[in-house]
Image (cartoon, rainbow, N blue to C red):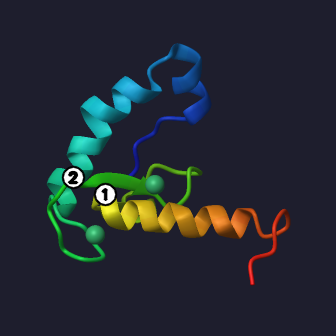
Amino acid sequence: MVWNTSKEHLKATGLLVSFWESFVSPSVLRIKGNKCELCGSGKRVCVHHKSYEEQTLENLQVLCFVCHNELHKKLYRLECKNVRSEK
Ligand SMILES: [Zn+2]
Ligand SMILES: [Zn+2]
């Protein structure tokens, strides 16, 4: 399934957030279930983009607040490895 919405277009029209919150996010949660795909928790779930290239179901992941935070911490570290080495 693909939502044919280019990010640039939505940004240009100022619709990105409202479209996402009112349409895409609820649809994904309805299809995939209101449960974190990693730990199964139903608390404060949100929809995470594995990639912002496409709005496909495969690219979206339902995560709870905790797992989502952890994931972004990891992603952030990966992005920052050239800036600050962690040993
Ligand atoms: Zn979780
Ligand atoms: Zn995310």
Q: In the image, is the residue at mark 1 within 8 Å of ligand 1 by its beta carbon? A: yes
Q: Amino acid at mark 2?
A: Arg
Q: Where residue 44 is drawn, which disc sits there? A: 2
Which of the 4 image quadrants contains residue 4? top left
54 left or right, relative to 64: right
3 left or right, relative to 8: left
Q: Looking at the image, which residue sits at the far top? A: 13
Above or below, comparing residue 70 to residue 6 in the picture: below
Residue 60 visible to an observer of this rendering:
no
Q: Nearer the viewer, residue 28 or 78?
A: 78
Q: Give x and y (percent) for residue 81.
A: 78, 70
Q: Helix, strand or loop at disc 2?
A: loop
Q: Which residue is mark 1?
A: 65
Above or below, comparing residue 58 to residue 28 in the picture: below
Q: Give x and y (percent) for residue 27.
A: 22, 45
Q: Give x and y (percent) for residue 70.
A: 45, 67
Residue 36 visible to an observer of this rendering:
yes
Q: Nearer the viewer, residue 82 or 7?
A: 82
Q: Give x and y (percent) for residue 13.
A: 52, 15
**Mark 1, residues whose alpha carbon is within 10 Å: few (<14), some, or many (≥20)?**
some
Q: Where residue 18 is drawn, which disc sits there? A: none
Instruction: Find the distance from the CA under tag 1 to the CA under tag 2.
Output: 5 Å
Which of the 4 image quadrants contains residue 82? bottom right
Q: Looking at the image, which residue sits at the far front? A: 87
Q: Amino acid at mark 1?
A: Phe
